[in-house]
Amino acid sequence: MDWIDAATAADRLGVKPATLYAYVSRGVLKRRHDGRRSMFDAAEIEQLARRGRPRGQPPELVIESSITGLGLDRPYYRGHDALTLARTHTFESVAELLWTDSPSTWPADQRDLPGWVVRPDQDATRPEGSDSRALSQRELLGGAASSRREEADWDGGVISRREVSSLEGRALSRGEEADRAGEAFSRGVEADPAGRVVRLGESHGDTAGRVVARGGAAELGGWAGEVGALGAAVAAQRGLPVELLPLDRLQVIVTVLGASDSLRHQLDPVSVAATGRRLISGLVDALPLVGAEDATGTVAERLWPRLTAREPTPALVDALRAAMVLLADHELAASTLAARVAASAKADPYAVVLTGLGVLGGPLHGGASYGAERMLAEVTDPGLAPRVIGERVRRGERIPGFGHSVYKNGDARGAALLDLVESAAPGHDRLAAARAVLSETRRRRLPEHNIDMSLATLAAVAGMVSGAGEAVFAIARTAGWLAHAMEEYSKGTLLRLRASYTGPPPTPPTQPPP
């Protein structure tokens, strides 16, 4: 059997590559994977070329996109394996990757950083002939690696977590920040990139390394909400019912943030990326605080106390970060298609995200994690798993968190996330319940679990509020929606689907009397 690549197959059929993959999704063609390449049976392609365009099926909308490709069991973000990114990158850096494919705008894989040798799941050490002090794989920008509880300055020295390092390597206490010259300032003031002193609560500088105050904390790289808009979004939350699910709160937050942003109609890529940083930060920071103390740092670290009152552990926060990376985009999922249609009409980024949020909550999409949360809550003891699953099967209900419309042989994202949760909390009773559910579904030969089930397990193990999985999904997928919006903004054409009309024939117009 001869196999040809996608470009050759598309050329032989006289179609675009996107149409070729549409044939695959409709079952017209089969393919196999050779690394990252899709390969097609040359004889099958030749037979289809002679037969002509497939008929007898409704037309399928095909949108060309360079953002995410779907492999056999996982997505690839601009050609990068999402599972690898989940092990090595922050959510923020993956969002930057989705928004632009320029390597200069997002951190490289730590294993590729110059001057360091890193092996998967091992420590990083400097090359032979230099300081060989070993540090864990958790990396900091600038080429140094550090453990979760430590930070490394630019010379490789280790300082405690309660300290912050300036660009020159000077260690300062947690209550201080440093400008580029390493000068220390008190917590009540901030320094812009030029070293000027700016009062807390003011924003300054551009997105390249600026420092922005947020409630007494500084966020680097522009990942912070605008102070006034954030205050309005927080105030809007106070009038909402206490029992409201986080996903519903996020829709209110987006509306308020959008109404407060005078730059929302700037649709060039740089402006949309800046809006994305403010918007995602606002979605996190405007949620009501559930934990006893607020948090600073990465988006995942700041999201934790908004979803659970449990004390954070490095491993579980890392699992939350990985979940956000794995959920950041998934090609033309239902919510993303809706978001692209909105963007094609030149709706602003906030309206695009609102459109995505409106679709994501459906039980066949992001809402599946909420269904899986509720199902898992019924398994108060692992021995109850057969009854809980059996009752749903008897009622003819869909088992939430199992099966996938694309990954017929299993969702690798779900397996990867579940492994992280198991490593973070071995022996946890909620993890045991989840494993019992998986065992029962396999005994019944039901489809494998997907990332929604793993997300529900993470939420249960971390003691998160009801509906937390949906919120994690929505905040993470905002990065993908905005990436797709950028593509539509650049096209300047309206996405217009056509219906295949099946109603009664139209009545001819009445002829006026002579």
Image (cartoon, grey):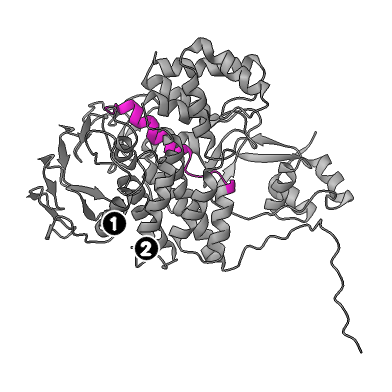
Three-letter code, disc 2: Ala
Quadrant of the image containing the C terminus? bottom right
Based on the displayed image, in which of its 4 quarters is residue 27 positioned? top right
Give whichever of 151, 505 is nearer the camera: 505
Tell me whether circle 2 and circle 1 mark residues in contact (CB < 8 Å).
yes
How far separated are the C-alphas under marks 2 and 1? 10 Å
Question: Is residue 442 shown above or below 331?
Answer: above
The residue under label 1 is: 232
Instruction: Provide residue 199's location: percent of width, then percent of height.
Output: 12, 58
Badge 2 marks a residue whose secondary structure is helix
Q: Residue at x 45, y 44 (%)?
A: 474
Instruction: Provide residue 50's location: percent of width, then percent of height.
Output: 88, 50
Q: Residue furthest bottom?
A: 514
Give whichever of 61, 184 is nearer the camera: 61
Give whichever of 377, 51 is nearer the camera: 377
Question: Is residue 293 shown above or below 270?
Answer: above
Whether residue 449 appears in this view of the structure is yes
Give whichever of 300, 468 is nearer the camera: 468
- Residue density around tag 1, few if under 14, some if 14–19, many if 20 or more, within 10 Å: some
Instruction: Provide residue 261's location: percent of width, then percent of height.
Output: 34, 63
Instruction: Provide residue 356's location: percent of width, then percent of height.
Output: 51, 51
Q: Residue at x 37, y 43 (%)?
A: 241
Give the number of the disc on residue 259.
2
In the rendered structure, which segment of residues is drawn in magenta?
311-334
Residue 324 is inside the magenta segment: yes
Badge 1 marks a residue whose secondary structure is helix
Quadrant of the image containing the N terminus? top right
Q: In the visual, does 69 lie left or right of 192? A: right
Q: Residue at x 57, y 66 (%)?
A: 491
Give the number of the disc on residue 71.
none
